Image (tube, grey):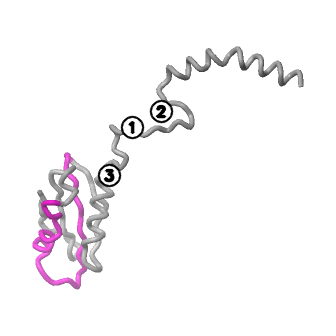
Amino acid sequence: MAAVVLWAAVGAGLAPAAQAQVQGMPRGDLPGQMGLDMEIDPFPFDPRLEIRTYFQKRLPTEWWANEPEFNLGVFSVGIHIPETWRGNPTGALMQLCPETRNELWRHLKRIELRAIYRRAEWPGVTCRP
């Protein structure tokens, strides 16, 4: 019991100093005080994820895309076209470019698409808004 009273007395003597120190600290740095800074976007743009998601939704059945690569300031994606498909691979890529009002264009200036058809790389397409 005496230890509890002694601890309370010591704690009471330190409370004003500790309180002043806490008031001077930014609130976000305190444990358990997770404030939301309105200047920071709570949903940051992840270009690789957004490009991957776009092509997952739009590629025809049996087509698949490589992971988007970032090189010299441009994202490029290899699109694999099945051997059983008939047509012009480069022309098919033109149809896959995001439309002008797509959210991707708020963050990116262009995306390079490369057709991989019958184990060969075909001429690519540059998508722009």
| Residue depicted at x 56% and y 37% | 32
Q: Which residue is mark 1?
A: 37
Q: Nearer the viewer, residue 39 or 116?
A: 39
Q: Which residue is mark 3?
A: 46
Residue 30: x, y in percent?
54, 31
Marks 2 and 1 sit apart, C-alpha to C-alpha, by: 9 Å
Task: Quarter of the image for the C terminus: give it.
Answer: bottom left
Residue 41: x, y in percent?
33, 44
Residue 85: x, y in percent?
20, 83
What secondary structure is marked by label 3? loop
- State the image quarter where residue 13 is shown: top right
- Name above or below for residue 74 compared with residue 60: above
Side of 90 relative to 29 (left or right):
left
Rendered image: mark on residue 28: 2
- Name above or below for residue 44 compared with residue 51: above
| Residue depicted at x 39% and y 37% | 37
Question: What residue range appears in magenta?
Answer: 72-101
Nearest to the eye among marks 3 and 2: give it. Answer: 2
Q: Nearer the viewer, residue 25 or 60?
A: 25
Mark 2 or mark 1, earlier in chain: 2
Q: Nearer the viewer, residue 30 or 62?
A: 30
